[in-house]
Structures are given as C-alpha cells and as structure tokens.
Amino acid sequence: MSFLYPLGLLALIAIPLLIIIYIIKNTYTEQVISSTYLWTLSEKFLKRKNPLRRISGLLSLILQILIVIFIAFSLAQPSFILHGSADDYLFILDGSASMNIVSGKESRLEKGKDKIESVVKSAVDGSAYTLIYVSDTTSVLCEDVTDKSRVYQLLEEIEEGYCAADLTEALEEAQLKYSQNTDLKLYLYTDKDYAGAGSNINVVNFSSGEENYAVTGVEYSVASSGLTVTGSLYSYESDASLTVSLTVDGAAACDPQTLDVKKLEACAFTFTCDNITVFTSLKVEISQADAMAADNECVVYSLKSDSTYNTLIVTGSSSSDNSFFLKSTLSAFGDVQITEMSFADYSGEGGYGLYIFDNCTPSVLPTDGAVWFINPQGSVSYTGFSVQNDVTLSSHGELTLSTSTASRVQSILSGTTWNNGTNIYITEYVKCSFSKSFYTIFSYDNNPVLFAGTNSYGNRQVVFAFDFHNTDFTLTPNYIQLMYNLFDYTFPEIVDSTSCYCGDTVEINVLAGCTSIRIDTPLGNIEYADTSADVVEYDVTETGTYTVTLMISGSERKVYFYASVPEEERYTTVTVDSDGYVYTDNGGTQLSVLGADGAAKDASSDYFVFEGTQSVSRDGTFSELWVWLLVLAVLFIADWGVYCYEQYQLR
C-alpha cells in the first residue's frame, strides 16, 4: 500500500488529543426524577436489559478514533496494488468530416469522446492508454499514459475535423502494438462499418441513418445576357423534396426551386439571372435542415483580377522593333496600358506591373514588378541568370521543347501543339546560365533560350535569349497561345479557383511586389505564407470561406475562396470492405479510400490482423476516495447513535 498524499496522515495527531479530552471530561449528568424508588427500579431494569451500558462511553471514543483514522486515510488517499489487474488500451478516434453529423443532441465525434471517457473511467487505476486521433493527419495524442486526467484533458482539446480521414496508418500502428501485447484492448470509434476489421478490434459505429442533404458541383458562366448557375442536389438517406435558392452578393437573384431528389441520385438545377454580368460572390443553399449543415450551401467567388496591367517597354539601340509584336500581342490579352521609351531615356522609372527590356539590360533591376528580357545584352545583379556570349549559327537551328513534367512548365505550354519538334527556328541566340529558380521552356544545344522563373526579389521573370526577328517565332501557329500563357504566368490570378474541398491544396500565386500574404481561415485562425517563391501551396483543412490578403506595393488586395465538405464524407451510412473501398448501404456509389500517395489501400493484409507474440501483465491500483467517504459516513451515523443512547436512554 502507498499513499498519494502522505501528509494527510498528520491528521492522526488528533487521536491523542481525543483521548485526553475523553479522560478529563465530566461523565456525570444531572437528572431530575420524581422518586428514588423509580430510579432504583429503573437501574435494576437497565442492568438486566442492557449489558453494554457500562461501555457505552468507551464505544463512543472508539468510534471517534476510527473516524479520525479514516479522515486521515481519506486525505492521504491510500493506493492498493492489485497484481495483474490493469489493462492496456488503445483508442482510435475517427475525426473525418462525417463525424460532425449530429445524431440526437450530440455529434458523432462527441459521442466517440464520451465513449472513450466512459471506458477510461471504468478501467482499473494503473491501466495504460494510447489515444490516436485521425483527421487530415494521424496524431498520436498520448502513448501508454496511466494518468486518467491527462486522457480526459486530451479528449477535451480534440477539435472537429473537416477532411476525409485515412485510418490506414492508425490501424497499422494499433496492430503493431497488438503484435507486441496480445492483452491490448483495441477500440475504433468511427461512423463507418469496417467489414472484416478483425476480432481483436472493437469497432463502435455511430452512424444511425441520419438524414443528410447536400449541394455540389456549383459552377457559373457569364454571357452578355446574364449569369447562369448550375449544380446538383443530393439526398443520402432517403428520397426528399428539397428547396434550393440562389443569392448573388447577398440578395436573392431568382425564385427558389423545389425539386424531387431520389436517394443517392444527382438532381441537377439551373438558375438563369438576366442582366447580372458582374458579381463578387454567389451562394446556393438548401432550405431544409438535416444532420450536417456544412454541406447545405456552396459559395463561389468571382475571380476578379486587376483590369489594368501597366507595362513599360524599354527598347535598346540595337532593337529590331520587337515592340510592334509585343504591343499588338499584349493589347489582345486585356486592358493593357503600354508605355514605350528608349533605353537612353530610361532612368529607373517605377510603378509598373511589367517591365520589358528589348535588346537592352538595365544597370539596376526593377523591384516592384515582373520583368521580361528579350535578347539580353548583359548580366545584371539579382536577375538569377547571367549572360555569357552571343552565338551565331551557320544555318538555322530548331529549338528543342522541354520534356519537364513540372506543373509550371506544363501550364506555360498548355494549349500549344508541336509536330515532331518545336517548329521554331533561330539563327542567333544569347548563351545564358541560370539558377534553380527557373524552368527551361525551349533550348538549343542544351542551352536555354526561353526560360521563366523568379528573380531574387521574388518577382516573376521571363527571358527570351533571342531576337524575335532572328527567328520565325512570331509566325508559328503557337505564338499567340504561348505568349498568352506567359502573360498569364506574369499576371496570374491570386488563386486559380475560388471553390475547393477540405483536404485539397490551393495554389496562391505571389504577385510582383508582394511583401506579405495573410490567410484568415473560417474558424478565425490567422496564418502567414512565405512569399519568397512564386507560388504558395496551402493545405485546406477547414470548411467555409478563406480570406487571402496580399500586401502589394503598400496596398492591400483581397481574394476569397470557399472550401466544402469532401463529397465522400457526405454519405451517412458507408461500409469499408476488405479491398479498401467505401460502399453505400445499398451497394450504390463506390468511393476509393485513398492514402496520401493517392493509392487505394488494401484493408485485408496491411493492417487488419497481426498475431500477437506475448502477453503483458500490468499491476493495477485501488484508490477510490468514495469508499473512504462511505466508511466515514457509517462511522458518523454509529457515533451519533451512541450519543443519542447516552442522552435519552432512561437511567
């Protein structure tokens, strides 16, 4: 036996004090009676009927000493060792978005937390607990912890998840621990039926056929006649009659529509809004309430870039008037305001979104915008590339198309077609070398002649290491599309799409002159992104509207995007079979359960049944305070009975 709070035994000092008080106290009481005869008679009666009369006072002392002893023990909280009585527990809690479905008054996640807490409370003290929470990532919150209060605290700190959860890693960890200890008790709290999960796992499924409706696949198109919005409605548990409405910039744009939706069948809807061609946001919403409110609406934001792109073209003395091609091409891509000047007149002017240096190189690189170089004449600091020498070919040579699979290269080449080569021929080029922050688009003799990337200021940069007049570049059928892609690369939208799903990765383009990127999440969290690269990859983990704020040349620019619940998490009743797939309860739509590598998981062999190799015995402890309080209550009642006997018994 040991004590959790040994200082509580100091209360035993009260025992000698109690004995001293018992010795010195007056045991006689004054009684008023009507006759000595009655007194003598009653005394004879008591002697005959109450043999314990003489020790009643001593009995009270004994009870009071016991009370002091048990008070001291209650304060010290003795702990008794129970050999081999404790267990090891491993809990896996599913934190996928579907666990937020409300069943009764609690969500499935809250029910899972309550179940774990109940198991821990009923377990013998000294048992060890491992808690794994699986949301967008797998987190081992504690391992072999024996402090119950610590487990309760961790359960309180668990927050809702909004992504699809891959339980593969957690189940593998559980079975690995089971292989080391066959006495391990495994619990999986989820809302999916894991068929063939193994007899060693206690699977607790919280799904109970709750109603859930969802709006999905919302898209829009804008024409001169107005705005058209399309999408689909789903009902995941039963047939339903659903009312869907559209609001544009916070105001109702069309009359609501009521549609009959079949279970697990997409029901398409279309809204046509005349005379609406410009908007900031639109929202499609289902009116009926269900068990998961997060998928009852979808918000789409308009991609609104700057309508004006200020461009400065600086031409060198050796320029062959490439500006003609540039001005006519760039003007076709949007509202481009072009300023042109000679290199002799250029003195470091600023305030432009794009600087084009045609057959010239400035002494100082602009810091507040993107830069294009055409046939650069020399090297300049912070560009990220250097000019080595001019190369003149004896005859025309064909450029080699990049075979890189990098997403940046593929986006620049998108929409272009090349037959048996590039179909671009040159007679001269500038031999250059560049840093790893650039991508080669075209090359000749393994030397880059068209490459793009970011300079040392973090601004986007495109380099044509040739003069347009020394090539047939402007005459090729891919010229317009390639230039458009390069212009789009130079002036990208901040985000490529304003609608995504939790668990997706959103690319945020770092614009020229951007000094900071702040991301406000739907739950009020604030994050800052690194602006040193030209693209920021941001993992979306919350449902709702994200606000992205860019600080560009001292002014703020904001864009928004909306993250929805993953479609596979909207099903209320699902089964994971041995091949790692999710099915609806009626054998309907099939959904792959994918891991981080995008490959389907094999639930039958990877993690479901390992054979244990040993049994681990763990000693438990008994230190329940309520037992001591119960004994104290009994002793107090007994002492009170003795007191009543002494005071009111006829003597």
Image (spheres, helix red, strand yellow):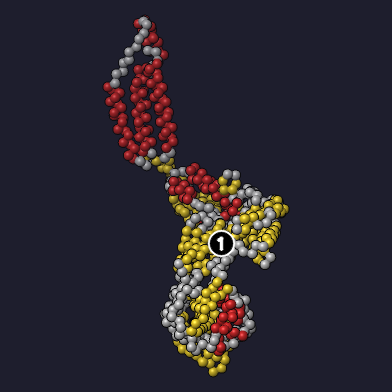
Residue 401 point in image, percent of width and height: 57, 82
Q: Name the kind of residue labelled 1 in the image.
A: Phe
- Residue at 57% across, 66% down: 304
Residue 502 point in image, percent of width and height: 56, 59
Q: Which of 170 and 66 is in front in this view?
A: 170
- Residue at 32% across, 34% down: 11
Q: Nearer the viewer, residue 53 or 149?
A: 149
Q: Mark 1 points at which residue?
A: 561
Q: Quadrant of residue 230?
A: bottom right
- Label 1 neighbour load within 10 Å: few <14, some 14-19, many 20+: many
Q: In which quarter of the image is the C terminus?
A: top left
- Residue at 44% across, 46% down: 149
Q: Can residue 514 be seen in this view?
A: yes
Q: Is residue 405 visible?
A: no
Q: Quadrant of residue 262?
A: bottom right
Q: Quadrant of the N terminus?
A: top left
Q: Viewed as shown, does residue 253 lie left or right of 337?
A: right
Secondary structure found at label 1: strand
- Residue at 68% across, 61% down: 274
Specify the farthest residue to the bottom. 394
Residue 446 point in image, percent of width and height: 52, 85
Residue 7 point in image, percent of width and height: 32, 39
Residue 184 higher or lower than 389, as above or below: above
Q: Which of 519 and 35 is in front in this view?
A: 519
Residue 600 higher or lower than 398, as above or below: above
Residue 162 higher or lower than 537, as above or below: above
Label tally: 1
